[in-house]
Image (cartoon, rainbow, N blue to C red):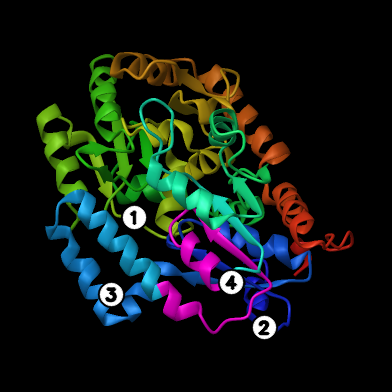
Amino acid sequence: MHGLEKTFQPNPLQALYVTSFPITRYRRPILAALALKTLGINIKILDGWGVVYHYRPFSTLSRISKYLPKSLEWITKDVCYEKALSLAISKLNPILLINLNLLGAITVRKLFSRIPLILDIQDFNIQLDGTIPLYDLQILRYSHPELVIFASKTILNLVEKRYPKLLKRTAHIPFGIDLSTFDKFYSSANPNAFRLQFQISDEYVLTFTGAAYFSGSAEGQGVELMLKAIKTVRKEISNIKIVIQAANPASEVFHWIVKLLKNLGLEDCTILLPLTHPYHQLRMNMLKASDVLLLPVGNVPTTYYAENIKLYEYMACAKPIAMVATPARLSVLNDRSAFIAHKRSPEEFASRIIESLVNRDEAVKKAAEARKLVEKKYDWRILVPLYAKAVGKVIGISPDPNFDEGND
């Protein structure tokens, strides 16, 4: 992607980016690599959990921790992560450190106390009252980051309002989307092939894609809310097909979704797909075959403040979006670019979905507006220079004004 492999060539100016998320699905480190390249800095991206699995004692302890009480399980896994990370990076010599979210931040700061540290915040735990748990606050305090980049403007505003003296310097750089790469795969997608593969004739296709997960007993994506809404939709519009790409068949959450579909009587009109690479042909065909893209929300407080990577993918598809409002989403989309349920209720979400199916002219206009918006504000070609400028201020390097990452 964009000649990213070149960033791993030897260079005395090298940054270390540590992430606890799979790079192929959570592509923030790739955005960072492109940005640092404009500063003349190569980047080493390290998969933190991959490091844990490399060290057998830590991987074993992490695996068996699931049998411990939840709070102890989380602490045990964090300790395994930090200790394994310490072993993996102790001999490196970076000029800059970037850590995705908070996990691992203490370790990289301890090992490289004199090297600038940037925290690239996708999200962190937020409590019902909008405060940050003490554990996360302590990490922010003791890691002393030179810069904290927030993907969500809502989380940035929350932190600066409630903890005005906590951070030295902040910046807001949305997730956005690598539009040229997305378009390359999306333009060749075949919606008819998808309909033929799953024997869909004239039904409306309602699609949700995104990894479903549990946080305690709560499901974070809002799959249950969405399916209850669709049950209502089906009473008025019977010729619908639901496509859900949210979990792999062996997972606990997949079996939970299957049970939920059965209880709601939606088994006969639902297609369940496994998670794939973001640009997998099946996924691209699915998105292009969709009549409406669905964006519900769970009842995990953090999800109300965090952005969704798939939000920008939905916008790039130029397909109608029906979504449940959150502060983060409303900072990106409005009623001119999406069908928005402003209350977290199946009934209101259902009414927005129905509206998107019935008012097709309006749906086309909203979809086109969302696409224009992502082109204008959230394409990586716009965000890469912003990210580079924010980092450059920390290390005293200005981006190369003649650099064009699209020409690699």
Q: Which residue appears at 70% of the width and 52% of the height?
A: 387
- Asked whether 29 falls inside the magenta stretch, the response is no
The amino acid at mark 2 is: Gln
- Residue labelled with disc 3: 58
Compared with 58, 148 (above or below) is: above
Name which of mark 4 and mark 1 comes first in the sequence.
4
Label 2 to label 1, Cα distance in Å? 32 Å
The residue pinned by badge 2 equals 9
Which structural element holds mark 2? loop
Can residue 248 be seen in the rendering of this structure? no
Callouts 2 and 1 close, C-beta under 8 Å: no
Identify the residue under disc 1. 275
Q: Marks 1 and 3, how far apart in space?
A: 27 Å
Quarter of the image where one finds residue 115: bottom right
Magenta span of residues: 85-111
Q: CA distance from mark 4 to mark 3?
A: 22 Å
In the picture, which quadrant includes the C terminus?
bottom right
Q: Earlier in the sequence, mark 4 or mark 3?
A: 3
Which amino acid type is marked by label 1? Leu
Between discs 1 and 3, the one toward the N terminus = 3
In the rendered image of this protein, does residue 244 appear above or below residue 325?
below
